[in-house]
């Protein structure tokens, strides 16, 4: 079975800063991979390379066995890229066109991707919205009249409208209230199971990654430190950094002082590597 | 005298369908760490800000906010200044938004001391150096000359905490102090806050949307929903056996890090906005236990539980509901 996504040795630098280095993974149909790490670890840069918003310095990304066009000049190339990978951004307040109702946003996407029959589009729009738990009222509303959770679900419906092979979610549930976040998480696990869409799920929240994903890739300063099934990773973290992230999650009996000390140790060790590299 | 005593505080804004705060009553003793948990729009920030006398302009306010016995509702400028400069201070969520980006860290820390205490530049700088060392920053003299953009988010939040400590407050109000930070930075900041709180015997109000964080760091927790306090309990008990249906819903919506992985049972619908109102319990529309004709008819009061007098809940059906410790609590 062809992997949905085959990523090898991605590297991206900005001047002297290496944002991502040596990221490789493969995503089977219906698979879900969590990209985990702190800010500056390269999670978002990796996500943006997958969608084509950043061009890697080296390394390859293959979707369904094919390398997407290197440049996105022309309508066909752009539409093909859109079909391959779609992205849902963190902030549902900024990622939808504020002047279009949710229904017409979805309608526009369908039209652009070659659905010319108005009635077919209308029924597909209803179907997409139902899939994320939205109805007629939300379809007719402008994004600003919807709550954060409704907007984020609309953004997911917009991404699904294209029927992409892979959906990349960059901290897509972080800004939502817990009770609403749970609704969106259930939507994600459902579309994965029902439509076989692959998910790349960028998050700093290990509990959420555990709920949504099969595997997790932990990034530290742009480099992968651990890539394993999420259950194993949480049971027995192999890298001190993964253990630190896991212990940092608040829970009863939690001791922030020990974690703070260990964090300094991991980061001091990191400065050591950098020092060695510079030599 | 209680350090902070909020008594039936109601805040109404013109044009809103429901009060921002509806008869909020809260107590915080010296040396106690109290959590205030809720989702966006629940009124937790407005409650915390009331302890500095910072209430929305044009709001109609009734009730009392006593800080060491001084009522801040309708207080004059002199009393507000007295409380804000010497008794209570606030750590805000986003240090990048809370610290002037075009002024040096030194200015941020020394200006209030010079203006409110009339200290000389030299005295204020000496104090600023002490404060930066107290919050664990590595090189205080250098930080004094730095601009906010030269520090990471975690370091800048330490600067914010140093600023909050400048007036030697007895009450520290922390409004989502770690929400803008990474998880492991969150642990550092909470370790710092916990250490300062214990060393100085501060009363601390920790506002957070993260119920597990509150359970892990606080002595006692209040849960807010739509401007009302719906449950109050010692932190460990709240987490182990939530009583109010909303608190149960919050815990049922949080994916667990350990134990069996069941499908989440999200609370249906969305938190109530200021444009909506309900004649009865504000949570009734989303509540699986709501009883038509009762819960949507009048609003339940926050009352002590008969079985556990140190806990309280605002729910008509709290005594009839199945015991969550057996049926719903997570391992």
Image (cartoon, coloured by chain):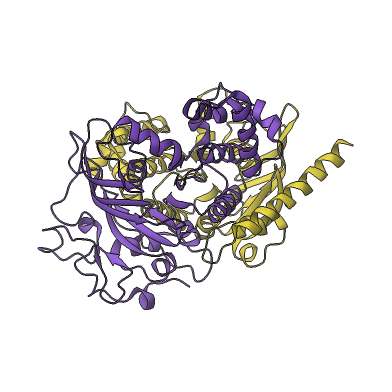
Q: Tell which of A242 and B239 is nearer to you.
A: B239
Image vertical order of residue B110 relative to residue B223, above or below: above
Image vertical order of residue A236 relative to residue A179, above or below: below
Q: Note the chain letter of the yellow one.
A: A
Image vertical order of residue B197 relative to residue A63, above or below: below
Q: Tell which of B104 and A218 is nearer to you.
A: B104
Q: Tell which of B51 and B41 is nearer to you.
A: B51
* Count of marks placed on residues: 0
Whether residue A77 is visible: no
At a point 36% along the width and 55% down the height, the residue shown is B2
| Quarter containing the N terminus of chain A | bottom right
- On screen, residue B318 versus residue A183, left or right, reads left
Q: Note the chain letter of the purple one.
A: B
The answer to which quarter of the image holds residue B138 is top right
The answer to which quarter of the image holds residue A94 is top left
- Image coordinates of residue B7 in percent, x first then y, are 25, 52
Q: Tell which of B274 and A21 is nearer to you.
A: B274
- On screen, residue B223 versus residue A256, left or right, reads left
- Image coordinates of residue B66 in percent, x first then y, are 31, 47
Image vertical order of residue B144 relative to residue A192, above or below: above
- Image coordinates of residue B319 in percent, x first then y, are 23, 74
- Image coordinates of residue B38 in percent, x first then y, are 36, 52
At a point 90% along the width and 37% down the height, the residue shown is A279
Whether residue A90 is visible: yes
């Amino acid at each position: 079975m062809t992997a949905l996504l085959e990523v090898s040795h991605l590297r991206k630098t900005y001047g002297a800063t290496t944002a991502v280095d040596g990221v490789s993974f493969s995503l089977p149909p219906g698979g879900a991979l969590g990209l985990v790490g702190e800010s500056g670890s390269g999670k978002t840069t990796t996500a943006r390379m997958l969608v084509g918003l950043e061009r890697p310095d080296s390394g390859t990304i293959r979707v369904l066995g094919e390398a997407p066009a290197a440049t996105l000049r022309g309508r066909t190339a752009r539409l093909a890229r859109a079909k391959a990978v779609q992205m849902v951004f963190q902030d549902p307040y900024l990622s939808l066109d504020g002047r279009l109702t949710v229904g017409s946003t979805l309608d526009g996407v369908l039209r652009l991707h070659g659905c010319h029959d108005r009635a077919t589009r209308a029924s597909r729009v209803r179907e997409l919205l139902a899939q994320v738990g939205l109805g007629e009222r939300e379809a007719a509303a402008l994004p600003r009249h919807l709550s954060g959770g409704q907007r984020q679900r609309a953004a997911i419906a917009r991404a699904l409208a294209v029927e992409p092979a892979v959906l990349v979610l960059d901290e897509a549930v972080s800004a939502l209230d817990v009770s609403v976040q749970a609704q969106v998480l259930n939507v994600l696990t459902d579309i994965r199971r029902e439509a076989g869409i692959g998910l790349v799920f960028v998050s700093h929240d290990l509990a959420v990654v555990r709920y949504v994903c099969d595997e997790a890739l932990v990034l530290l300063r742009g480099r992968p430190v651990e890539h394993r099934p999420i259950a194993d990773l949480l049971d027995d973290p192999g890298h001190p950094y993964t253990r630190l992230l896991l212990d940092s999650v608040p829970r009863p009996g939690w001791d922030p002082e020990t974690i703070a000390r260990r964090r300094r140790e991991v980061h001091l060790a990191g400065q050591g590597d950098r020092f060695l590299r510079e030599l | 005298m209680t350090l902070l005593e909020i008594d039936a505080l109601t805040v109404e804004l013109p044009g809103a369908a429901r009060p921002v705060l509806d008869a909020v009553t809260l107590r915080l003793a010296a040396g106690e760490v109290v959590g205030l948990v809720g989702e966006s729009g629940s009124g937790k920030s407005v409650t915390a800000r009331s302890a500095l006398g910072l209430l929305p302009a044009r709001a109609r306010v009734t009730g009392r906010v006593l800080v060491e016995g001084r009522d801040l509702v309708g207080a004059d400028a002199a009393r507000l200044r007295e409380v804000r400069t010497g008794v209570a201070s606030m750590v805000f969520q986003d240090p990048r938004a809370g610290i002037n980006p075009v002024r040096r860290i030194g200015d941020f820390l020394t200006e209030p001391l010079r203006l409110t205490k009339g200290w000389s530049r030299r005295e204020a700088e000496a104090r600023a150096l002490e404060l930066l060392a107290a919050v664990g920053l590595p090189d205080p003299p250098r930080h004094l000359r730095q601009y906010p953009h030269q520090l990471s988010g975690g370091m800048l939040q330490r600067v914010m905490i140093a600023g909050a400590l400048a007036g030697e407050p007895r009450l520290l109000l922390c409004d989502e102090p770690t929400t803008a930070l990474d998880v492991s930075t969150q642990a550092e900041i909470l370790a710092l806050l916990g250490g300062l709180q214990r060393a100085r015997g501060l009363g601390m109000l920790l506002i957070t949307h993260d119920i597990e964080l509150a359970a892990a760091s606080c002595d006692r927790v209040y849960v807010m929903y739509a401007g009302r306090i719906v449950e109050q309990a010692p932190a460990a008990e709240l987490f182990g056996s939530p009583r109010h249906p909303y608190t149960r819903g919050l815990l049922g919506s949080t994916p667990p890090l350990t134990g069996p992985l069941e499908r989440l049972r999200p609370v249906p619908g969305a938190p109530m906005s200021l444009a909506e109102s309900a004649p009865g319990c504000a949570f009734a529309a989303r509540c699986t236990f709501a009883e038509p004709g009762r819960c949507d008819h009048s609003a339940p009061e926050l009352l002590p539980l008969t079985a556990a007098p140190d806990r309280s809940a605002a729910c008509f059906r709290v005594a009839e509901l199945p015991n969550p410790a057996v049926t719903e609590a997570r391992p």
